[in-house]
């Protein structure tokens, strides 16, 4: 055996390490939670890290997982060792190629971070739905239950596939294993070399397609031989289980870690057995060990090789004593009489019992159950409940564990208080932090320090919320003398250490529920040690007394500010943890933190190192234990999360999810088909802003720019008559309307939603008006939120209750006018300063009452549709955008389907209208049929006519009248919007986008172009500009951004606009109005600054301006309507580049980083890019100047 | 033919023309052109404290601590294993200049705080710098800060740098001190080897359209040299420091005046940016001619000949000079006008 070394890494990194070491071609595509595997591989290759054979693997990003699978298929056919990484929908897209790869017996390992499939909703979290959907492909399936196993079985799989020729899906649970950091034993390259046979690799290469020894592979077969050839592979599958075991045994010989096809743990004479696979088996193992100590005869069979399913190995691994078996599946197969693993087991046993030589004389009772879908917690209490269920004479079959199913009563109860003793000797620590305060990275660092400096085992798992702005993170860390198998969160009463990194959480979370007796509580607070007790909620005070909790406080923000760390408190809080948790001797711990700081910043920043050292030392001076009084002196006030008049569903479901109690919601309260109400974001008052915009009504010229740019619809304008002001709060501000567009005497107000504003200050940035006597004072200025909150909350409420201004009277083509429309997209969870959301909000204002939205998966589907709430909302009439997300890859087609359905129903309604004309009345029918809906007035009139029609239809007896009633709403204008990011439009969904653009149908495609895959963490797309440093382009993207607009203009009847609202707001407004008015397909490509760009989004507008002025983002509109008038359809809206391209790109880290890593390449890219932007503008200019022949009909008219 | 050589900061220089801190040293080709044209030493472009800090903060924010705590995206940009910062680039350029050029290279550090950046002087020395120019441009904007504490900053910075480097250090100063001569003595005592008089500033300007305040820097003119000449004349003989005249030196006349006042070298920047590195050879030729025509044997002979100590009318460098200027506008008492 070789010497063992330890490292602390997560499951993704473990898989990527082995994959990169043992492959030559790696095709990748980002998808959560598998993206980090591709990112690691790409990064290592970019750093020229070599594989086992001394060469750097090629890593190629594809346009989709289907593309990645195709590329791997090709690479395998050409004889390369090839792999890919994926999850969920990505694996589904690979299925066609997986059949091919398996059918051709091509050795490969796909590493899969198993994740839920999108059904009633998307979920990024872990279960086995995806791998189960791929189980028929002919791939073998090998499963790892922990990061250590991921490393081991990744290697074992690689060895097996070469020997067996059967391709393998090596999977492990998304997030729970892929993202769990654990201390694991590394594998020496020498071990890898001994397991991976060069001879077998050469055989693989020998089978490659080559003109030197050409063959035909992938033929088309007919009824005569297809069947037989399909059976030719049986021998390979039959031989595989023995091969797997041989290699597992060989691995044991080299490392001392033994695996079997099925690993049994527990009592040798167990009568009750659980069979399962995945990370849950770790918890089950821990529980079985605990129950054994209590004398219970229970056992666990862990499945390692799921396909080919070796019935004989399964049966021989089960103890003779086995009487009842529960098979747990982490997947759901609606309509089946059991989930896949259950059926495999029951089939294996049944075949055995009915065979000649039987393992079991009588059939054991076998029940199947579902657990853990979408990373639902799976705890020892649940394992115990399953074993308890097995005691019953008639245990429940097809049960669920972990939820409350009060509809079909599948669930079995469990005891949430049940604990094993596995962590009695461990330290269990829970940290509450903000996503942006560095809590998670500090904890990852702490795990590394402890894992690599002590003999302790370490585990870290991180729970994130669904928001992008103001996200809360909860870190669960365990350190102990024994290997940690607890693949579940630290539960109530378990934590020896609880840290609250943000004082605002005191009122929001019951953090000390997690604390055990004699534990430690660390609080970051600006309160002094003497007064802090009085600021703790009463419930928390009581828990501190009851559980004898030691409390330590630090003013981390003060220490950080004083030591030059700014707002970065991660080092301070990490030092506190080490200082008081006593996991390491204090002095050793501090040395270790300092070493870690030095390792991170190296010689790159002596000042940063000094700063951190100062912060560490100062922390120790400022960390105080507080004296605990002997009694509680505060009561806990629980404020209702939603108002008492909120709809029942919001109270029972939405509010409970917001409160973090979603796990307790029973099945009966949830919708059966994934349908949720709109307008729920307004209930979630997040109070993120430290400062709010304050309006100076006198100074304001009422331009409307502030509500226009607000990413969260948190500042709005409304026009109303003076009579409505009689009950206005005294502090409510308004001003007489200026200008000639609206009647004199009307009043306008610009009002902020104080609890929904995120404090991004973009409204203040865009405000063009400055005080004549004080240039620093604008018509909008930021002011502290706390003193304004209550006053503005009342003003906001009053503002909301003011009537909406008549839409028919609004001058839509002005910014000021368009901002009088109510936004029907509000308070989304997008990042502060998001560059995408103002476009959606604008669309919702202009067309929201008639919109149907098909939304591609990505940022916009997450801030638009990630529960508990949605920003899409309705107007006072109940109308609003109807929104749905189908998939990532199909969104254009999905939207087109919606359009076609509406068109068909509209056509049918018109046919019925004609048929029923006599009954309905000629005039009504004719006015409906001839309606002009080009403006707000026309749209409203048609709605009234259709309403009148529906009333009239009630009195008609014909069945056709009922049919017409059901589809009559389609007689009103419907505005179909197909929305998504550049990853969708340029890459995975481009085929669909292209097809829809040629359809001639009236759809509006809005591409929110951040020039990178934003939602999955900044991977390169074809929209990424040349020279950008992004994931999968660590050395700078070598190719130019795809010109999607130019491609679309080639179709001639497509309306195309390229816009940037922060650079030219009126052009953006016009583009939206023209696109919607265009009767065919429209494409709007919207420049969207994003945090992925590496620039603070307070500069959002400046960045848009720089992008336009440098020529990076020319503004234009291509309107086919102009061609009909004899005008060139292309109209340039921006001037020739007026600043050097360098001036734009040096402001953003996505570009400027390249000067730090590859300065010569950066200059070379810049030279090419500068030439490109200049030439592109010239090209567009010439296109726009081509004389355009008037269309024939126009000529006739003239 | 007169000897042009001079001593500056203990360095033996072929002539008194030393290009000052400017973008010309960023490029090896232009730096070589300066040497070929006769520059006797080269002051590198400045390594700014703000540039170092700004870069560090930028990298912290957007590379090392970019996480927003979101499940799908822990980060947005790859974290490189190694990367070059502005200090690395500066050191590389210094090494390149040292290997490509034969003339002494004076590295330039520009900053105000005592916060670690000054330690980079050690790395500049290790990379081969022959001397350091410490350019402290501190704006004493607070009404609460006394003038001696402002001067104290300069002294502290110099002392800190002195602790870490053994090569000569020259202090590049602004003219805005209440007692320049006294302050010069303090700097001398604190270990300075020379003074460079005076710095020219980026000055804030107001954009009348946007009402924003924006930095501006225009090229110098010969007029500005007079302030430098005056103070060099005043200091010459009062301190033993090397003296460099900088700011507004465009012509051979400007150079000659500085030398006569007591400068050991004259720096040049705007003139070279406007007319190219070759301009140095013209001025050297003109200097040589002037010396010969006026029968000077050497620059050394010329240096400080009209310093305050040696001037025909020493008071002319002081307040009397002011009266003389005013007086030059009044006509002769014998003329009725």
Image (spheres, coloured by chain):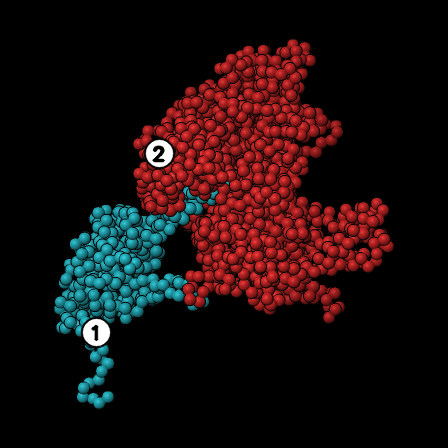
Chain colours: A red, B cyan
List x then y, in percent, for residue B253: 24, 70
Binning the other alpha carbons within 10 Å of mark 2 as few (below 14), some (14 to 19) or many (20 upward) gives few
How far from the left and from the top, in percent, is residue A295? 51, 13
| Chain of the residue displaying label 2 | A
Residue B2 falls in image quadrant: bottom left
For residue A672, which quarter of the picture?
A: top right
- Residue lying at 33% horizontally and 46% vertically, measured from the top left: A562
Left or right: A1192 as drawn, with respect to A384 = right
Picture coordinates of residue A830, whole percent (x, y): 53, 47
Q: Is residue B255 visible?
A: no
Instruction: Give above or below for B141 relative to A449.
Output: below
In this rendering, is residue A12 above or below A790?
above
Q: Nearer the viewer, residue A988 or B253?
A: A988
Q: Please tell me the numbered disc located at residue B322.
A: 1
Assess disc 1: are there few (<14), some (14-19) or many (≥20) residues with their C-alpha within 10 Å of its C-alpha.
few
Q: How many marks?
A: 2
Residue nearer the viewer, A1143 or A672: A672
Q: Which residue is mark 2?
A: A627
SS at mark 1? Answer: helix
């Amino acid at each position: 055996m070789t010497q063992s070394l330890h490292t602390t890494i997560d499951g993704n990194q473990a898989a990527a390490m082995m994959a990169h070491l043992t492959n030559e071609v790696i095709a990748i595509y980002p998808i959560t939670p598998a993206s980090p595997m591709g990112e690691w591989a790409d990064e290592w290759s970019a750093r020229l890290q070599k594989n086992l054979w001394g060469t750097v693997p090629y890593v190629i990003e594809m346009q989709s997982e289907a593309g990645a699978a195709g590329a791997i298929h090709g690479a395998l056919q050409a004889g390369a060792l090839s792999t890919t990484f994926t999850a969920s929908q990505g694996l589904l897209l690979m299925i066609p190629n997986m059949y091919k790869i398996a059918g051709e017996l091509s050795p490969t390992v796909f590493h899969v971070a198993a994740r839920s499939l999108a059904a009633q909703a998307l979920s990024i979290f872990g279960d086995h739905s995806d791998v189960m959907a791929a189980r028929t492909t002919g791939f073998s399936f090998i499963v790892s239950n922990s990061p250590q196993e991921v490393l081991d079985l990744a290697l074992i799989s690689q060895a097996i596939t070469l020997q067996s020729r059967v391709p393998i899906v090596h999977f492990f649970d998304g997030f729970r294993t892929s993202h769990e950091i654990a201390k694991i034993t590394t594998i020496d390259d020498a071990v890898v070399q001994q397991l991976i046979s060069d001879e077998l690799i050469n055989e693989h290469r020998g089978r490659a397609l080559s003109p030197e020894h050409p063959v035909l592979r992938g033929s088309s077969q007919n009824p005569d031989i297809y069947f037989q050839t399909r059976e030719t592979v049986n021998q390979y599958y039959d031989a595989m289980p023995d091969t797997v075991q041989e290699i597992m045994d060989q691995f044991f010989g080299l490392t001392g870690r033994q695996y079997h096809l099925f690993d049994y743990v527990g009592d040798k004479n167990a009568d009750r057995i659980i069979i399962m696979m995945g990370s849950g088996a770790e918890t089950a193992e821990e529980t079985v060990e605990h129950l054994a100590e209590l004398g219970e005869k229970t056992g666990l069979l862990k499945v390692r090789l799921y396909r080919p399913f070796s019935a004989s190995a399964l049966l021989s691994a089960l103890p003779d004593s086995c009487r009842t078996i529960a098979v747990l599946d982490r997947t759901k197969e609606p309509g089946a009489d059991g989930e896949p693993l259950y059926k495999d087991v029951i089939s294996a046993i049944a075949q055995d019992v009915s065979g000649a030589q039987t393992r079991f004389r009588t059939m054991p009772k076998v029940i199947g159950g579902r657990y853990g879908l979408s990373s639902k917690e799976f705890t020892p209490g649940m394992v115990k409940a399953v074993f308890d269920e097995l005691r019953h004479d008639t245990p429940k079959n097809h049960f669920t564990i972990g939820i409350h199913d009060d509809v079909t009563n599948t669930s079995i109860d469990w005891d949430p208080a049940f604990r094993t003793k596995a962590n009695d000797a461990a330290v269990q620590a829970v940290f509450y932090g903000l996503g942006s305060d560095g809590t998670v990275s500090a904890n990852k660092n702490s795990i590394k320090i402890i894992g690599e400096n002590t003999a302790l085992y370490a585990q870290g798992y991180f729970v994130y919320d669904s928001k992008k702005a103001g996200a809360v993170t909860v870190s669960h860390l365990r350190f102990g003398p024994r290997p940690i198998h607890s693949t579940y969160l630290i539960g109530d009463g378990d934590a020896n250490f609880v840290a609250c990194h943000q004082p605002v959480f005191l009122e929001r979370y019951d953090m000390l529920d997690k604390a055990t007796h004699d534990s430690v509580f660390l609080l970051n607070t600006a309160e002094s040690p003497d007064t802090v007790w009085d600021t703790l909620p009463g419930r928390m005070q009581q828990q501190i007394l009851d559980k004898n909790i030691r409390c330590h406080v630090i003013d981390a923000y003060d220490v950080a500010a004083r030591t030059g760390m700014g707002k970065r408190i991660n080092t301070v809080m990490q030092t506190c943890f080490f200082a008081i948790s006593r996991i390491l001797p204090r002095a050793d711990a501090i040395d270790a933190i300092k070493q870690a700081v030095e390792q991170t910043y190296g010689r790159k920043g002596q000042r940063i190192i000094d700063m951190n050292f100062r912060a560490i030392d100062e922390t120790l001076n400022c960390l105080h234990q507080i004296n605990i009084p002997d009694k509680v002196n505060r009561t806990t006030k629980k404020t209702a999360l939603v108002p008492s008049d909120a709809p029942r569903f919001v109270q029972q479901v939405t509010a409970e999810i917001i409160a973090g109690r979603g796990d307790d919601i029973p099945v009966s309260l949830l919708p059966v088909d994934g349908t949720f109400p709109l307008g729920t974001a307004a209930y979630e008052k997040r109070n993120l802003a430290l400062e709010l915009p304050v309006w100076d009504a006198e100074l304001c010229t009422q331009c409307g720019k502030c509500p226009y740019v607000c990413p969260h619809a948190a500042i709005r304008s409304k026009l109303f008559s003076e009579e409505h002001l009689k009950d206005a709060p005294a502090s409510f501000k308004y001003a007489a309307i200026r200008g000639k567009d609206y009647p004199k005497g009307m009043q306008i107000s610009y009002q902020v939603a104080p609890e929904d504003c995120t404090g991004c200050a973009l409204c203040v940035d865009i405000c063009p008006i400055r005080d004549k006597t004080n240039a620093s004072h604008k018509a909008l200025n930021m002011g502290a939120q706390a003193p304004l909150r209550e006053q503005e909350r009342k003003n906001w409420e009053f503002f909301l209750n003011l009537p909406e201004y008549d839409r028919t009277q609004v001058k839509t083509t002005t910014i000021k006018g368009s901002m009088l429309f109510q936004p029907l997209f509000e308070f989304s969870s997008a990042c502060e300063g998001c560059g995408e959301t103002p476009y959606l909000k604008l669309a919702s204002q202009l067309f929201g009452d008639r919109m149907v939205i098909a939304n591609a998966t990505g940022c916009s589907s997450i801030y638009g549709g990630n529960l508990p709430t949605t920003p899409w909302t309705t107007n006072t009439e109940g109308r609003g955008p109807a929104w749905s997300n189908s998939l990532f890859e199909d969104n254009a087609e999905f939207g087109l389907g919606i359009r076609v359905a509406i068109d068909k129903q509209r056509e049918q309604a018109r046919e019925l209208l004609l048929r029923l004309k006599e009954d309905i009345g000629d005039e009504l029918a004719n006015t409906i049929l001839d309606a002009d809906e080009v403006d707000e007035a026309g749209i409203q009139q048609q709605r009234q006519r259709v309403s009148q029609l529906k009333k009239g239809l009630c009195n008609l007896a014909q069945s056709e009248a009922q049919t017409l009633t059901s589809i009559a709403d389609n007689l009103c204008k419907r505005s179909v919007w197909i929305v998504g990011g550049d990853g969708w439009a340029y890459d995975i969904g481009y085929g669909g986008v292209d097809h829809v653009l040629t359809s001639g149908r009236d759809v509006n495609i809005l591409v929110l172009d951040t020039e990178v895959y934003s939602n999955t963490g900044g991977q390169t797309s074809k929209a990424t500009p040349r020279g950008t440093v992004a994931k999968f382009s660590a050395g700078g993207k070598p190719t130019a951004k795809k010109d999607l607009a130019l491609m679309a203009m080639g179709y001639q009847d497509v309306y195309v606009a390229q816009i940037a609202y922060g650079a030219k707001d009126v052009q953006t407004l016009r583009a939206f109005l023209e696109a919607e008015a265009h009767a065919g397909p429209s494409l709007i490509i919207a420049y969207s600054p994003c945090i992925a760009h590496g620039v603070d989004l307070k500069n959002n507008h400046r960045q848009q301006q720089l992008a336009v002025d440098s020529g990076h983002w020319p503004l234009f509109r291509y309107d086919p309507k102009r061609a009909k008038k004899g005008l060139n359809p292309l109209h340039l809206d921006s001037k020739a580049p007026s600043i050097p391209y360098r001036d734009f790109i040096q402001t953003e880290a996505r570009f400027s980083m390249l000067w730090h890593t590859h300065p010569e390449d950066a200059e070379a890219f810049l030279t090419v890019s500068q030439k490109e932007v200049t030439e592109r503008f010239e090209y567009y200019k010439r296109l726009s100047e081509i004389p355009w022949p008037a269309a024939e009909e126009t000529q006739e008219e003239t | 033919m007169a000897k042009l050589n001079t001593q500056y900061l203990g360095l033996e220089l072929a002539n008194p023309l030393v290009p000052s801190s400017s973008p010309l040293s960023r490029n090896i080709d232009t730096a070589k052109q300066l040497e070929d044209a006769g520059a006797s030493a080269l002051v590198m472009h400045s390594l700014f404290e703000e540039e170092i800090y700004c870069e560090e903060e930028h990298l912290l924010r957007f590379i090392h601590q970019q996480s927003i705590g979101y499940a799908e995206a822990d980060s947005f940009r790859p974290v490189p294993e190694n990367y070059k910062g502005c200090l690395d680039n500066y050191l590389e350029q210094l090494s390149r200049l040292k290997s490509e050029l034969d003339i002494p290279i004076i590295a330039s550090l520009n900053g105000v705080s005592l916060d670690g950046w000054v330690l980079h002087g050690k790395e500049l020395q290790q990379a081969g710098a022959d001397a350091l120019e410490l350019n402290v441009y501190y704006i004493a904007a607070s009404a609460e800060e006394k003038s001696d504490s402002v001067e104290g900053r300069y002294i502290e910075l110099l002392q800190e740098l002195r602790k870490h480097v053994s090569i000569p250090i020259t202090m590049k100063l602004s003219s805005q001190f209440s007692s320049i001569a006294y302050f010069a003595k303090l700097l001398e005592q604190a270990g300075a080897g020379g003074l460079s008089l005076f710095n020219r500033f980026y000055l804030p300007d107001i954009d009348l359209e946007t009402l924003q305040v924006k930095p501006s820097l225009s090229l110098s003119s010969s007029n500005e040299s007079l302030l430098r000449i005056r103070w060099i004349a005043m200091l010459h003989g009062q301190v033993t420091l090397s003296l460099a005249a900088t700011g507004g030196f465009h012509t051979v006349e400007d150079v000659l005046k500085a030398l006569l006042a007591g400068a050991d070298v004259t720096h040049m920047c705007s003139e070279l940016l406007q007319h190219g590195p070759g301009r140095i050879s013209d001025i050297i030729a003109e200097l040589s001619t002037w010396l010969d025509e006026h029968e000077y044997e050497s620059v050394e002979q010329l240096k400080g000949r009209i310093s305050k100590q040696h001037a025909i009318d020493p008071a002319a460098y002081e307040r009397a000079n002011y009266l003389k200027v005013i007086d030059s506008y009044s006509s002769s008492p014998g003329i009725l006008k």
